[in-house]
Image (cartoon, rainbow, N blue to C red):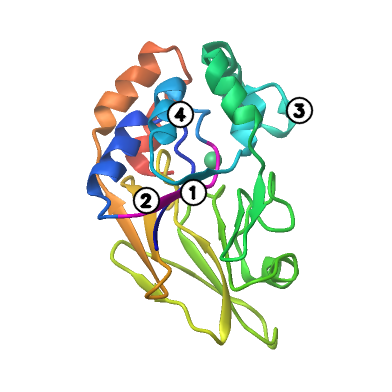
Amino acid sequence: MRYLVLTDIHANLEALEAVLADAPHYDAVLCLGDLVGYGPNPNECVACVLDLNGLVCLVGNHDLAALGELDLAGFNSIARSAARWTDSALAPAVRTFLAGLAPRLDRPEYVLAHGSPREPIWEYLENAAQGPENFDAFDGALCLVGHTHVPRVFTRDIGGNGPPTVRGVLHGDRLQLSKSHRYIVNPGGVGQPRDGNPRAAYALWDAVAGEIAFRRVSYDIPRTQAKILAAGLPKFLAERLRQGV
Ligand code: ZN
C-alpha cells in the first residue's frame, strides 16, 4: 500500500495540482486538514481532493474557522480576514463535506492528527520537548500530522526511553521506519510552505517497504498570487508564498 500524504492545501489550486502531477503511483490519499483558508480556490481544491482515490481526510483549524465552528480570537488579523472571506466563498456542498470531518483519526495502521495527537486542532508540534506527551497520546508506530507547514520527523524508541529527537527534512530525504522506533511525521504544507522553501511539500508513504519519501515541487506561484490579490485577500498572503514563510 502506497499512501500520498497531503496537508495544509489552503485553497492553493496550483500547488495542489502540481503535487498531484508530480506524485508517483499511490493507492490511497491521507489528507491531514486545512484544505481551505488563506488561498483563493477553496471550492476547487475540495472538489479536487474529493476526486482522489481512497481518500481519508481530516478537518483543520482553518476549515473549522471558515465554517464558523471555531472562535476567530485565536487567529491573527490576516488569518481572521481570510477565514471570513473563505466563509463567504464556500459552496454549500463543500461546507457539508468539511463539517463531517474529524481533526484526528485512529486506524490500526496509523494515526492522523491535524496539529498533534494530544491537541489535534491547535498545537503546533515544533520541538523535542513536546514529544513525550504526544507520543503518549497515541498507540501504534506512526502518527502523521500537519499544521506547522514545516516538514519534520519526531522519533522515539519503542520503550519510551530517552528524549524524542526531531529533525527537519528536505526534498529527496527518505525515512526508513524501524520496528524499534515510533514516529510522528509532518510532510510539510502543500499550499503555504513555511520552511523558507516556497515549493509545495508532500510525502509518499510506502507501508510495505516501511519508508516515507519527502518531496517538493515547484508550481505557478505568480498565478496564485494574482488570484489572491484579485479576490481581495490580504496582500501578505500573496507575498509569503514567494518567500515560503
Ligand atoms: Zn494550515
Q: Provide the residue designation for mark 1.
A: 149
Q: Provide the residue designation for mark 4.
A: 46
- Helix, strand, or loop for circle 2? strand
N-terminal label among 1 and 2: 1
Residue 73 sits in quarter? top right
Q: Does the residue labelled 1 lie within 8 Å of ligand 1?
A: yes
- Helix, strand, or loop for circle 4? helix
Disc 1 residue type?
His
* Disc 2 residue crowd, few under 14, some 14–19, many 20+, Cα 10 Å: many
Distance CA(mark 1)–CA(mark 2): 8 Å
Q: In this view, does 135 lie above or below 188?
A: below
User: Residues at badges 1 and 2 in contact (C-beta under 8 Å)?
Assistant: yes
Q: Give the range drawn in magenta.
A: 26-34
Q: Is residue 199 above or below residue 111?
A: above
**Residue 180: percent from the left, percent from the top?**
56, 87
N-terminal label among 3 and 4: 4
